[in-house]
Amino acid sequence: MKWFLKLKELPIQGIIYKIESKDYYLYDEHGKKVRCSLRGKFQKEFNLKRDKLYEIDIAIVGDNVRYEMNHDGSGVIEEVLPRVNHISRKAPSIKGSGTRGERLEQKIAANIDNLVIVSSCKNPKFNNRAIDRFIVAGESSHINCCIIINKTDLDEEENYKEYSSLYRSIGYEVVESSVKENIGAEQLHKVFDGKTSLVWGHSGVGKSSLLNWIYPHLKLKTGEVSDFSSKGKHTTVTSLLMNIDKNTKVIDTPGIREIDPYGIREEDLGHFFKDFDEFINECKFNTCTHKHEPGCAVIKAVEDELINPERYVSYLNILESIEDDMNF
Ligand SMILES: Nc1nc2c(ncn2[C@@H]2O[C@H](COP(=O)(O)OP(=O)(O)OP(=O)(O)O)[C@@H](O)[C@H]2O)c(=O)[nH]1
Ligand SMILES: [Mg+2]
Ligand SMILES: [Zn+2]
């Protein structure tokens, strides 16, 4: 063997900021962009795991990876470094796959400090059921959740205020914002600055608009909301991590239709509702699912108006969707 073949450089480290099909785009240690592919060995792992219905994402946005350079300036990912955390949902059902597709985990991003849940007062319609689902996804990954209620300019009656106080009373930070009327920027900076935040929510609520507003150099594409259905048009098509400054990263994501939290057992769901926490230990049975069991302290707290019925309905709603889930 000739000497120069042995002279293989040690792999270098980068962070994945975007994935398009089989291309993984990284920022290297100096912030330079590198396009990479995954080393073939990962493909084998993917096939094995797919058969066991475990996961479909080997490397995801926010992952720190080690890679080697090719001569043409592209790279090959050799190793995905351990994650601090990741956030995921059940992958949407794939046409023709029966229930199987629904059981896969779709990982959205890794190594995040904040899950920023964006909702809108109107256009699309305010949806607290979805907010509660996003919260469960965040809580189950032990990630700090923050709620943005955007487009306050469209709700003259200020109906959203009831929900701001509900979520604040549970302990969540809530930002009421209007990109159109320039309200809330200061508070948003406090949420984003110095952290890595994942911005998540339905299409059309204003995720990309918010980011453009507080960090104007981003120039993300934004889209109209359909007049007919009041739904967003899925303008952002791929998750994108952006370095704002040395300590601040934001990840804009495509709006999603369904948010089904992944990998949660019935008896654990209550723990991801922080407002249920102080009652759960008082339930008669420690396997209580707070649905109909006798001696349930959560049900009693709802009756006594100590837990908001809206939150309890959301809870039952999610419980129903995980009842016939895969066995862990
Ligand atoms: N009235 C009003 N409109 C807003 C506000 N924020 C955003 N919009 C509008 O809402 C529409 C959708 O905004 P986007 O930023 O593209 O929404 P998104 O959440 O990124 O949508 P996807 O990329 O499809 O997930 C655009 O027409 C924005 O101008 C707001 O505070 N008030
Ligand atoms: Mg967008
Ligand atoms: Zn109970």
Image (tube, rainbow, N blue to C red):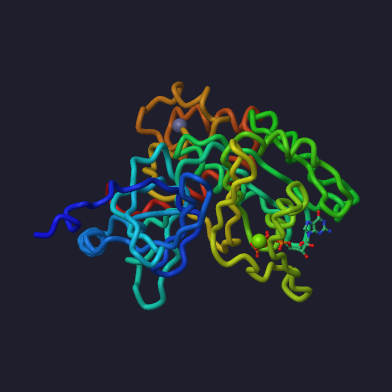
Residue 190, percent across and down?
71, 33
Q: Can residue 323 be seen in this view?
A: yes
Foreground of the two, 86 or 130: 86
Residue 237, percent across and down?
57, 67
Q: Quadrant of residue 184?
A: top right
Foreground of the two, 72 or 172: 72
The residue depicted at 47 percent of the width and 67 percent of the height is 20
Count of numbered tags: 0
Is the residue 173 above or below the residue 65 in the image? above
Q: In which quarter of the image is residue 161?
A: top right
| Residue 33 falls left or right of residue 48 | right
Residue 187, percent across and down?
76, 36
Foreground of the two, 328 or 198: 198
Q: Is residue 108 visible?
A: no
| Residue 138 falls left or right of residue 220 | left
Q: In which quarter of the image is residue 238?
A: bottom right
The residue depicted at 41 percent of the width and 63 percent of the height is 73
The residue depicted at 62 percent of the width and 34 percent of the height is 194
Location of the N terminus by quadrant is: bottom left
Is the residue 148 above or below the residue 105 in the image? above
Q: In which quarter of the image is ligand 2?
A: bottom right
Residue 223, percent across and down?
72, 68
Q: Quick one: which residue is furthest to the left in this view? A: 1
Q: Quick one: which residue is furthest to the front in this view? A: 3
The residue depicted at 59 percent of the width and 38 percent of the height is 246
